Amino acid sequence: MLRTIAAFDRMGEENAFAVLARATELARQGRDVINLGIGQPDFATPGNVVEAAVKALRDGHHGYTPATGILPLREGLSADLHRRFGVDVSPDNVVVVPGGKVTMFAAILMFGEPGAEIVYPDPGFPIYRSMIEFTGATPVPLPVREENGFAFSAAEALSLIGERTRLVILNSPANPTGGVTPKAEIDALVAGLERFPHVAVLSDEIYGQMCYDGLAHTSLLAYPSIRDRLIMLDGWSKTYAMTGWRMGYAVWPDALVDKIRKLAVNCWSCVNAPAQWAGLEALAGPQDAVHAMVAEFDRRRAVVVAGLNALPGVRTATPKGAFYAFPNIAGTGWLAKPLASALLEEAGVATIGGPDFGVHGEGYIRLSYANSVDNIERALARMSRFLSERTPDRRDG
């Protein structure tokens, strides 16, 4: 019998892909399924970006690139970060990777080992905890609470840091909640981190260009006091509707950038060459498609919030960022995962149960409003009928 190391038995996964597979299978069987589960923009990649990739292929960009990414792209990212946040970032500190998860994997792998602790948001992106457990480190959940607008609390985060803490993971705007942490709270966290110079920070800012109600995204790159231990994660997947292109990047501090370069050489060599030229065009070209997409998400957000709050036993906070709602379903009498399963199998609506995002996710489900208004309204109508007619039994809730 084959034997693997124990770390692989500790590895979790992202259940959104399992739900996507089941929804796809039901659709293949002829069922009408409305997918509000997967976190993927339902927009096409902007045409100028696609054409840039085609041009790169025709121009002969068919070979390996530097492990950290082509210099024009890293320079373009430095310029983009200066434009957006007024910060100076050397292209030498920028590393282009095949998707945002790669930065999570690398950062957690660097700091996680038996005896170490890593603080992460809960409910939060499931790969955080999965990778922490894979390394043998102890996951320390930072509760992200509904009553706080699903923003993290600086005081609570700082209270979880101890001598064994190696890394703190932050995410705003947040998946799965849509919460945006106010700048004042981030100011307080950064000030408190001065007491813990041994702790690194991974700031997941992949939804940074998706804020609503006039809110501006606060990047941790804007805080000089932690730049020497900050890893800032971002990418093209959400902002430019490029999930399948597998394009992410991170800004690494001087002390770690050569370590991630070596990991790239050992693991993925480099990112797809034409995709990198497409990524440069996405940054440098017109941003109209981004603004139009975010405006449409904002319109859908209003539909989702009103519709969810009209459902029996359901209430939802208004998300301030990303494209997710995280309604409280405790009043329905259902547990979250059985409800999500029944909605898919019986009502044809794909959602994700809150516990798939952490120990504090019970009582919630996640809906993505990266779908058309028509489909969202149809899904809400199905959910309303289901909750009005279907009583949970003991196995359900």
Image (cartoon, grey):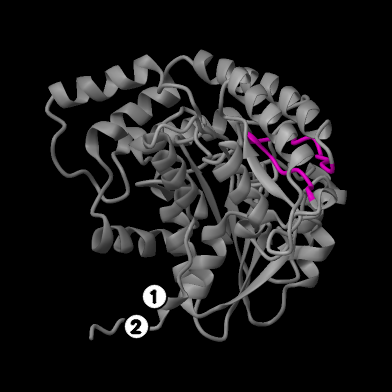
User: Residue 257 placed where, x, y %?
Assistant: 41, 58
In this view of the protein, which residue sits in the foreground, 204 or 338? 338
Quadrant in which the N terminus is drawn: bottom left
Q: Residue at x 83, y 40 (%)?
A: 315
Provide the residue span drawn in magenta: 313-329
User: Residue 185 placed where, x, y %?
Assistant: 81, 50
Instruction: Identify residue type, mark 1.
Output: Phe
The reply, left or right, for residue 388 in relation to residue 252 is right
Q: Residues within 10 Å of mark 2 (few under 14, many from 20)?
A: few
Q: Main secondary structure of the magenta part?
A: loop
**In the rendered view, would you say 19 is above or below 230?**
above
Quadrant in which the C terminus is drawn: bottom right
User: Residue 317 placed where, x, y %?
Assistant: 81, 39
As drawn, the label of residue 8 is 1
As drawn, the label of residue 249 is none
Instruction: Identify residue type, mark 2.
Output: Ile
**In the rendered view, would you say 232 is above or below 211?**
below
User: Residue 338 placed where, x, y %?
Assistant: 65, 56
- Mark 2 sits on what residue? 5
